[in-house]
Image: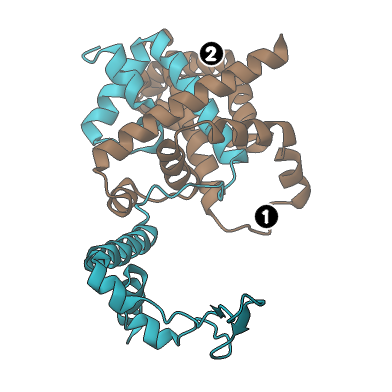
Amino acid sequence: MSHSHEFVEERLPLYLTGDLSKDDMRAIEAHLVDCRSCADQLESTATSMAAVLAHGSAEPTIEKARFPWPAVRRAAAAAIIFGAGFFFGRGSNSPSAQADDSLPVPPTPTTLAAPGGSEPKVVRTSPPQVATRGIDQYAASDSPFAASLRALAALRRP
Amino acid sequence: MTLSAENSNESRPRDARWARLLDAHRPAAVARAQSMLGDRHEAEDVFQDACLELMGKIDEFTDERAAAWIKIAVVHRAVDRLRRRRFSTPSASVEPAAQEKREDPDRRSAVDRALRRLTPRQKEIVVRRLIRNETFASLAVEIGISETTAKTHFSRGIDELKRMLSTEDEGKTA
């Protein structure tokens, strides 16, 4: 028995599938013939492998241990887009930039004090307008999300 | 005394020893193979294959070592036969009734439970090598690990399965 019990027991599954070198196969067989304990281990190992071969499903739910590249790519793209958006959008926080970027303020009713203390008269200078702009106009602005939109559009361009 | 008679006298004790060994170990060896294969005829075939190989080296072995060798050869050949059965396409020679007889729902669910409790890597390698018959070389490359590492995962996975299945068996008999 030139090999230790530990050496032999560790290799019993590979001995049974024939996945060892010829020298190792011969050495393990020689050990097994003289070692009752390891021969018993071989029998229980073979019984378990037989059970798996006879009853094991060929398609169990194998969690593929592969790196999730598509998910990582999507996450990285999102991070870059929003990061770029916030980075480039920071410049628009200055008062002048805010003024330039501010949406048109809808005209508000103007209260005029009527002469003689009578009821104040409300004069509407123009009809109320909703603060809307086209998506292109918004995307062209300096806001952080506009920058994100531009980056996203650039990515989707063929 | 003729040469043939001389040979006959020499081989007589050998034959007697051979017959004695087979008689002594046949019942246990066939029962062991049958418990693994689930088929009496296949178990007999496995025992005969093992004996044919032993015949060539019987003079090298004491009775005790010959008995150990029969046990080792029988379980090894039973695993080989199961692998061949698993990987060969279903043939007309396998009767559906015999196939159904081999199915054991309790054993199947015990094996599936044990497989689920392995680590994902162990399970993947055990299934791919043992059940799908992929080589270690190809599956190691595909997974991105060395062949030696794949073999280590396989051996540990089989050890875990052995431990879990024997615990289940003990639970049933208790």
Residue B93 numbered mark, or none: 1
Q: Position of residue B42 (x, y in %)?
A: 62, 38
Q: Position of residue B113 (x, y in %)?
A: 61, 32
| Front residue of A109 and B129 | A109
Q: Residues within 10 Å of mark 2 (few under 14, many from 20)?
A: few
Mark nearer the N terminus (2 vs 1) = 2
Q: Quadrant of the N terminus of chain B?
A: top left
Q: Secondary structure at mark 1?
A: loop
Type of the residue with mark 2: Arg
Question: What residue is disc 2 on?
Answer: B20
Against A127, residue B142 (above or below) is: above
Inter-mark Cα distance, 2 to 1: 34 Å
Q: Which image quadrant is residue B36 in?
A: top right
Q: Is residue B115 left or right of residue A9?
A: right
Q: Is residue B80 left or right of residue B102?
A: left
| Front residue of B54 and B152 | B152
| Front residue of B151 and A123 | A123
Q: Colour of chain A?
A: cyan
- For mark 2, name the chain: B
For discs 2 and 1, the disc positioned in front in the rendered view: 1
Type of the residue with mark 1: Ser
Chain letter of the brown region:
B
Give the residue drawn at x 44%, y 24%. Answer: B159
Q: Position of residue A78 (x, y in %)?
A: 35, 63
The answer to whether residue A94 of the structure is visible from this angle is yes
| Front residue of A50 and B8 | A50
